[in-house]
């Protein structure tokens, strides 16, 4: 019998790590175990850009390696979190990214009755660069692959939907240095601020495999008594 996942309270897992550290993959795997939605700010913004919405128009800079304006991102994430599927828990990937976003967002989390947990994926920058250059995205469903760490079963083809895989331009160029630098400059104060507000922090090594990372994150959450696994099924009345 498969273990049944239980959370003792609704959690908001905030995933932090440099671009390419594996937080997107970790978010997706964690989402499969918990059934909590994995909300990637980058994906959310790219959808709006593709759909030509006003939020998308305001965020066009992300295609050149800049970040979208805080008020646009705040509004999109808060709207998304108001949906029914986020009530039991949520995985946020890439948000809050700036101190301003964080200051706005903490009271919102409180309003949704979600307890934030900061999860940091630590990875050396040389490794970050190597990984970014090996990263591929499905042009149809957005699934992420890595030619070294998580190669697709058939080269160039998405395992999930059969779509074509493409590299992202901002992973391949000198924009990378800028993204890594901005990540460090913007995100460090966020982590410090969250710690100062007594938000629990978990540190993981980005060198671990995607499934290893998922298992250690679940083990840490279990140690904190935030989640548990039971082997009883709904048919057990003992
Ligand atoms: Zn796909």
Image (cartoon, rainbow, N blue to C red):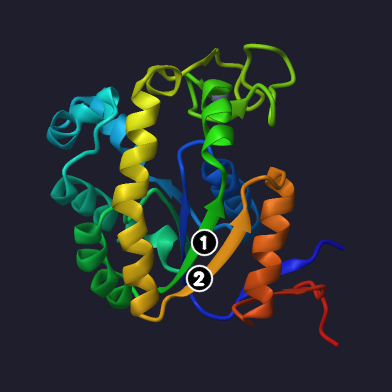
Q: Does the CB distance between marks 1 and 2 fall below 8 Å?
A: yes
205 relative to 40 in the view: left or right: right
Between 188 and 94, which is closer to the camera in this rendering? Answer: 188
66 relative to 131 in the view: left or right: left
How far from the left and from the top, in percent, is residue 124?
56, 43
The residue carrying mark 1 is: 119
Relative to 112, does residue 163 appear above or below in the rendering?
above
How far from the left and from the top, in percent, is residue 197?
34, 79
Q: How crowded is mark 2: few (under 14 residues within 10 Å), some or many (20 or more)?
A: some
Is residue 151 visible in the rendered image? The answer is yes
Between 187 and 107, which is closer to the camera in this rendering? Answer: 187
Q: Quadrant of residue 203?
A: bottom right
The span from disc 1 to disc 2 (Cα, nearest Å) is 6 Å
- The quarter of the rendered structure image containing the N terminus is bottom right
Relative to 167, does residue 62 appear above or below in the rendering?
below
Give the number of callouts.
Answer: 2
């Amino acid at each position: 019998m498969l273990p049944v996942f239980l959370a003792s309270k609704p959690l908001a897992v905030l995933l932090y790590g440099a671009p390419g550290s594996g937080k997107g993959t970790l978010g997706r795997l964690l989402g499969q175990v918990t059934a909590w939605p994995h909300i990637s700010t980058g994906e959310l913004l790219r959808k709006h850009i593709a759909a030509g919405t006003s939020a998308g128009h305001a965020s066009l800079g992300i295609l050149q390696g800049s970040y979208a304006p805080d008020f646009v991102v705040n509004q999109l994430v808060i709207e998304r979190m108001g949906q029914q599927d986020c009530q039991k828990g949520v995985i946020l990937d890439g948000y809050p990214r700036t101190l301003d976003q964080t200051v706005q967002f903490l009271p919102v989390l409180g309003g949704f009755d979600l307890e934030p947990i900061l999860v940091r994926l630590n990875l050396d920058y040389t490794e970050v660069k190597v990984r970014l250059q090996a990263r591929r995205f499905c042009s149809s469903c957005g699934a992420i692959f890595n030619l070294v760490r998580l190669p697709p079963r058939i080269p160039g083809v998405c395992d999930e939907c059969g779509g074509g895989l493409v590299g992202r331009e901002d992973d391949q160029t000198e924009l990378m240095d800028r993204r890594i630098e901005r990540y460090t400059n913007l995100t460090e104060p966020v982590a410090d601020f969250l710690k100062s507000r007594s938000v629990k922090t978990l540190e993981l090594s980005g060198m671990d495999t995607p499934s290893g990372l998922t298992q250690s994150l679940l083990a840490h959450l279990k140690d904190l008594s935030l989640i548990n696994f039971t082997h009883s099924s709904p048919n057990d009345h003992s």
